[in-house]
Image: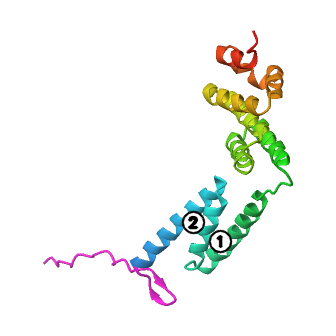
Amino acid sequence: MTLNKPPVSAPAKRAPRTIAGAASSHSNANRAALIANYETAIHLMQQGKFDKAHAAFDKMLLNSPGELADRIRMYISACLLQISKGKTTFASHEEQYDYAISLLNNGNYEDARQNFKAILAAKPSADYAFYGLAVLASMTGDSHECLEHLTEAIRQNPRNRIQARADSDFQDMADDPRFTDLLYPEV
């Protein structure tokens, strides 16, 4: 006589439990969204977008568990420190120009461009800012923009023509006949 034993089934998986009871799949979705937002905010910091990262961390802080909230507060502090460092004030437009030139020399072309344009927004007659934009355009290979800015710099201050003749930053423009005509109109 053979006894048929009932088939043994695997024990059913139980839902994770928390102190308050069973964890819901809704909380898992919230946790996944929180982690995704956290990673996005970290990525913004790495890109130097501290204002946006700060806003993202602030939003997360309201719904974060304790261990993550502490870390978020640390990142908020770091963002605020970087934001306060980034706000540079200048005593004069000439001082801002010197800063823009240092940015240009270090390869921070977009920051240099923003500073030159800020000078021109405040003082449209700043021939040196047009000259700086011309140098920047030459260094980045934009000959048309270089010629436009250099023409304006020379129009506002003819001494810029003499300075440009000796400026090695315009070496990439030396073969352009328009550049030669601009610098040596008397020939």
Against 96, is 80 above or below? Answer: below
| Magenta residues, start to end | 1-24
* Residue plotted at (60% across, 76% down): 61
**For numbered disc 1, what is the local secondary structure?**
helix
* Residue plotted at (83% across, 27% down): 159
Q: Quadrant of the C terminus?
A: top right
Q: Is residue 11 left or right of residue 27?
A: left
The residue closer to the viewer here, 31 or 137, is 137
* Residue plotted at (68% across, 69% down): 76
Characterize the magenta stretch by its predominant secondary structure: loop
> Which residue carries the number 2 mark?
38
Q: Is residue 141 left or right of residue 127?
A: left
**For numbered disc 2, what is the local secondary structure?**
helix
Q: Which mark is residue 72?
A: 1
x and y percentages locating residue 153 in the rendered image: 74, 32
Q: Earlier in the sequence, mark 2 or mark 1?
A: 2
Task: Write down the quadrant of residue 90 in the picture.
Answer: bottom right
